[in-house]
Amino acid sequence: MFNLTKIICTIGPSSGNPATITRLMEAGMDVARLNFSHGTHESHLANITMIRQAAKELGCRTAILADLQGPKIRVSKLPDSKPITLTDGAEVTITTRENCFGPDIIPTIYKNLPLDVKAGSTILLDDGLLELKVIEVKSATDILCRVTKGGLLKEKKGINLPDASVSAPPVTEKDFEDLEFALANGVDYVALSFVRHASDIENVKRFIHKKSMNTPVVAKIERPEAVVNIDSILKAADAVMVARGDMGVELAPEKVPRIQKSIIQKCNLEGKPVIVATQMLESMISNPRPTRAEASDIANAILDGTDAIMLSGETASGLYPVEAVKMMSAIAREVEPVIVSRDHELKTRVLNPLYGAADSLCYATGAAAAEIKAKLIVTYTESGSTALLVSKYRPRTPILAITMSEEIGRRVNLYWGVIPTVIEKAASTDRMMQLAEKAALDSGFASPGDYIIITGGVPVGQSGSTNLMKVHKIGLSSAGAAAADRRRVTASCPETGTAVCIDPEKCVGCGICVSCCPFKIFGYQNNKIFINSENVGGCAAEKMCVKKCPAGAISVTVNKND
């Protein structure tokens, strides 16, 4: 089943094997996420190889998203991995010194921590489950704190500074090493964690461009500074992820739903893909069914207008990775048909001056598809931009994106409502129409007699030249004269006395007769209907073809000799 909303799955220990990756794709995974906070380059390369192989075998175009760790502040490794007990009211010391341990000492890998906090600062541990208050910055390495919310602290847990500005570089040395590896192995998207400013995105893009590549960059919004700077970040990024995990720790949890809705709305207006992530089906890490609240959370994200919804621990380390994808897909299918018309909203979406007339044409494409109840929008795209522009206006008609590049085919698989297909390059406009019709039929979304909308560009094959929209009825030739082949319009069977006739002047080539006849008396080739004379003897003379032909072009007669 096809979902308009795309599904991203994190690959980890529970899913990093060929069988499970294949099942995830069959269940509805559109994008596979590799989390570079964990694993090695060797393990990520193994996953990339398995993903590409499974996609090839299934004939799908699953994209790969490399999620960089960013300047994550963590607790260091503890002796024998034994957790530290933090008691309410107790004093503890956070230290950046190496190999410094004790029952009241919390070691951290982040050397700049004493520079970033001051007396009175709040320090959150383990996604906010534990809380400390800074009493005094004792030295360049040690911070004296009081425990205000205690519990067990395990090694490698995250440290958040909700009221401090992190001085660590937005892209670490590890991030650049991981980025180079990811680009060398052909990932389709790169996600940057803990983005604070548009310059963070621009810095990564410069690195990518120096490699003579244009891999899109996803900005993860999880820091308070990113929320404040969202407008400039949105213009710099190719896509945005609402990363609610750290966001819910750095900001008050009650603020997250409003921020999520605001970011989705801004992305929709700008036509930038947006992903909602974190704890969407958290309970399915250990349970086969989600909570009602989780189902509502996914539904509301879809209703808000997200392009994609993401699973993290559910598929990376959970007990039910495939079931989680199936559940997410089922919720999406249930919600998408009842999304109310948003024409008033769509008209306010920002026309992108970079694409000029193409943007207006893509808006008109969605409007025309709704007006004539087209079964499919077929859009030719060299770079993926036309498919994104059509998707921006959220037509209720699926979008078949035709491209000549496997890379672009994978890239557009993140876009809302887009189905990628890779075909040969069209040498002319007529050939473009023929290939579009064939692709529409092959997709299963359209049948002979259905209307489709075709968008493309002239001259053919030139990126950024989208300037053409055609309403096309499948079964009509490019000259609009789809008639039955005059050499084969009548056939009869002497044994049964049955004669079948097609009037070529009336036939519109819709193909309804082909689909309704169980005896395969009618055929469809080169935009024309013909009669299989050898099958006429099987005719039951029920005349279903006569009744269903909208043009009244078919007649069936039976002359029995006694």
Image (cartoon, rainbow, N blue to C red):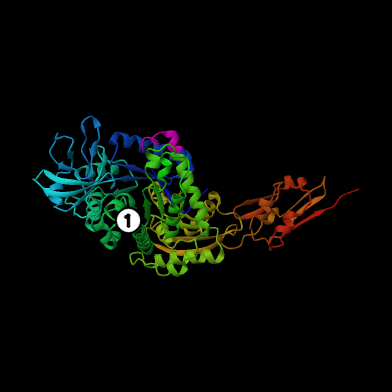
User: Does any portion of residue 218 appear in the rendered image?
Assistant: no
Q: Which residues are magenta?
A: 12-22
**Quick check: 155 above or below 489?**
above
Tag 1 secondary structure? loop
- Picture residue at 46% right of the left edge, 57% below the top: 379
Q: Position of residue 93 (x, y in %)?
A: 15, 42
Q: Which residue is mark 1?
A: 238
Residue at 32% in and 56% down = 238
Depicted 15 relative to depicted 159: above or below: above
Can you name the residue that lies furthest to the top here? 80
Q: Position of residue 346 (x, y in %)?
A: 43, 67
360 in relation to 388, above or below: below
Residue at the far right: name it.
562
**Residue 429 at x, y = what percent?**
48, 59
Foreground pick, 251 / 273 = 251
Q: Position of residue 559 (x, y in %)?
A: 85, 52
Magenta segment includes 16: yes
Quarter holding residue 259: bottom left
Rendered residue at 41%/52% (across/down): 308
Question: How many residues crowd around disc 1 within 10 Å: few (fewer than 14), some, or many (20 or more)?
Answer: many
Q: Amino acid at mark 1?
A: Asp
In depth, the one of 199 and 161 nearer the eye is 161
399 with respect to 156 (left or right):
right
